[in-house]
Amino acid sequence: MTTHQDLAVFSATVPARAEHLAPLRRRVRRWLTHRRVPAPVRQDVVLAAHEALSDAIDQPGAGERTTVTLHCDRDGVVLTAIDHFTWTARAHHGDDPGERRLRAIARVAERVDLDVDADRGTLTAYFTLPR
């Protein structure tokens, strides 16, 4: 697992395998805690990171590397996950596991953007911090 951390950015690139789920959750939670992100927002971001990596694990390219990046400022947290997602605009309405994961992320995030091309997908989830 490679990780880059500084004052406002966390980035981890991990193989899309189940044994990396718990360590990634712990690292994300710890980083958010050090930035004093309130517990409810922290839990939502951790859930979104978990669901994004879980979807990557279920894809045909499972085992390949997936990147999860967080940016935190005084207004909120932005989570970006890049992988071989199969999510599309229709995913908000289907019932397979990946589509349920995307809906779970959309329920906890303020906004979710999805950019999918033939090779890769980028999920960006926005979480607002309370004033």
Image (spheres, rainbow, N blue to C red):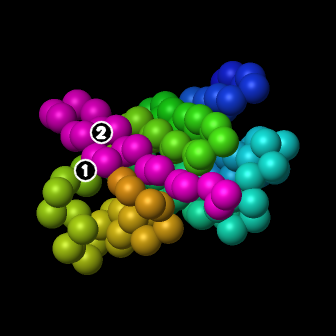
**Would you say residue 49 is visible in this rendering?**
yes
| Pick the front one: 22 or 9 | 9
Left or right: 118 as drawn, with respect to 27: left
**Farthest residue toward the bottom?**
95
Inspect the image, locate mark 2, and give the three-letter code of the amino acid beneath it: Gly
Q: Residue sitting at 59 percent across and 38 percent down?
A: 70
Q: Residue sitting at 28 percent across and 47 percent down?
A: 114
| Pick the front one: 3 or 64 | 3
Q: Is residue 117 magenta?
A: yes
Left or right: 72 as drawn, with respect to 128: right
Instruction: Please tell me whether mark 2 sits on a helix, a strand or a loop.
Output: strand
**Farthest residue toward the right?**
34
Sequence-wise first label, 1 or 2: 1
Instruction: Please tell me whether mark 1 sits on a helix, a strand or a loop.
Output: loop
For the magenta stretch, what is the residue range? Answer: 113-131
**Would you say residue 57 is visible in this rendering?**
no
Return the x and y of residue 32 as percentages of the image width and height: 74, 47
Quadrant assignment for the N terminus: top right
Q: Main secondary structure of the magenta part?
A: strand
Callout 2 environment at 10 Å: few (<14), some (14 to 19), or many (20+)?
Answer: some
Quadrant assignment for the C terminus: bottom right
**Residue under pointer 2:** 121
The Cα–Cα distance between marks 1 and 2, rounded to whole angstroms, is 7 Å
Return the x and y of residue 94 as percentages of the image width and height: 20, 73
Q: Quadrant of residue 105?
A: bottom left
**Residue under pointer 1:** 86
Depth check, mark 1 against mark 2: the one in front is 2
| Pick the front one: 123 or 73 | 73
Image marks 1 and 2: residues in contact by CB distance under 8 Å: yes
| Pick the front one: 43 or 94 | 43
